[in-house]
Image (tube, helix red, strand yellow):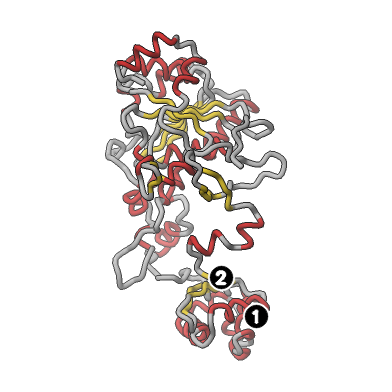
Amino acid sequence: MQDQGKATEMPLAGVKVIELGSLIAGPYASALLGQFGADVIKIEPPKGGDPLRRWRKLHDNTSLWWYVQSRNKKSVTLDLKSPEAQDIVRRLVAEADIVIENFRPGTLEKWNLGWGQLSALNPSLIMVRISGYGQTGPASQRPGFAAVAECMGGLRYVTGYPDRAPVRTGVSLGDTLASLYGTIGALMAMHHLKANGGTGQFIDVALYEAVFAVMESLVPEYAMDGHIRERSGSALPGIVPSNTYLCSDGAYVAIAGNADPIFKRLMAAIGRTDLANDPNLAGNEGRVRQTDMIDATIGDWTARHTLEDVLRILGEADVPSGRIYSAADIVRDEQYLAREMIQHFELPDGTPIDVPGIVPKLSATPGQTRWLGPKLGEHTREVLDAIGVTPEQFEQMRKAGIV
C-alpha cells in the first residue's frame, strides 16, 4: 500500500528542501533526502514541468522514471523568469534548510536567486550547486551533461573492449554520482552548522569531478611511470581472475576469484589443482603475468557447463560468482525480495507498478516511499497558502501564467 502519511520518526524529518533543478543530477539528490523524511518542494515551470516527466517509457503520458525519482516530493509550478515567482522562491528559501539546483552557473544569479541573494535572506542556508564543470574555471559556462562528464572524468576511456570505440553504461552514471556527492556535502554542511556552530555554505559539485573521484588509481599510476589504463572489456585490469565467461547454454557468468585463497578454491573446483598449488600463481602479481592463460582455463571450463551448473559448483566451493541480471531477473530474485528492494504501488489510475526499494537501510529510522511522483503543480496552492499567498494573488498569478 502507498503511504501518504507524514515523515514521522525519520532521520531528516523537519528538514525543508527547495529543489530548483530539472532532469537528473539535482532532482536525484533531493530525492535521496526526501526518501529519509525531508520535506522537498520541487519547483517546475508551469508549461510542461520537468522534462523528465516525458523521458523514456510513458504511462498515461507520464514517465515511469518520473514516478520513482520524484517520489515524496511536492510539485509547485513557478515561472522563475517572473519577478513574482522569484519573490515566492525567496520567501520559501527564507524558511528552508537546503536548496538544490543544477542550472548552468550564473542562471540563478540572473534571476536574482543566486547564492549571494539567498544566503543574505537565510544565513544558515545550505545550497547544493551541481553543474557540468563547477562554478569556477574556464569551462564553467559550458553546458554539461553526464555523457560528456563521463568522458572528461576518465570513465568512458576505460570502458569497453580495446579494439572498439569506448562505450557508456546504460544509465546516466555521471549525474547520479554527482547527486550522491551533493547529498553527502549537504549532510556534512548540516552537521557543521548544528554541531560545530558553523554557518551556512554552498556545495559546488561538478559532474566530471564526481566521475573523476571514483577512478581509483588512474592518476597515481600515470604520475608514477606514465601508465595509461586502457579498455579491458569485461575484465578488471590488474586483478586476476575477475572476468565474465561464456557458459555452454549461451549465458554469461561473472567470476571474481582474485583473492589468493579464493583463487585456490576456484582452481580446485574446476579440476585444476595443479594451478591451485602453483607457487607462481599464489599471489595476484604472479597471476597478472598469466592473465590470458588463467582466463582461458576458466573459460574452457565454463564453456562445458550450463550457467546453473557453474553457479552451483562455484557456490559449493565458496567462490564469488553470479549471473548477469536483467530487469526480469531482478524483480523475481529471492535476495531482492527478502530485503524489500522491490516495492509495490499503484499509479493514479490504479495500474500496479513496482519501484526500487530505498538505499541505505537504517535500522532505527529507515527511509520510506510515502507517495510516487506528483502531478504537475499538484501542491502549488498548498505550498503558497502556507507562506501567505492569498487566493486573489494566486488567481492573478495563474491568469498571468506565473503558476
Residue pictured at 59% horizontal, 76% vertical: 311
Q: Please determine whether, in this image, residue 114 is positioned above or below residue 159.
A: above
Query: Residue 386: where, in percent of width, then height?
Result: 52, 15
Query: Residue 111: where, in percent of width, then height?
Result: 32, 21
> In which quadrant is the C terminus drawn?
top left
> Callout 2, which amino acid?
Gly
> Can the viewer see residue 99 in this picture?
no
Residue neighbourhood size for the residue with mark 2, other residues' Cα within 10 Å, grouped as few (<14), some (14–19), many (≥20): some
Name the residue that disc number 1 marks: 265
N-terminal-most mark, 2 or 1: 1
Residue pictured at 39% horizontal, 41% vertical: 62
> Can the viewer see residue 137 in this picture?
yes
Residue pictured at 47% horizontal, 76% vertical: 251
> In which quadrant is the N terminus drawn?
top right
Q: Please determine whether, in this image, residue 192 is positioned above or below residue 63.
A: above
Name the residue that disc number 2 marks: 322
Q: Please determine whether, in this image, residue 251 is positioned above or below residue 133.
A: below
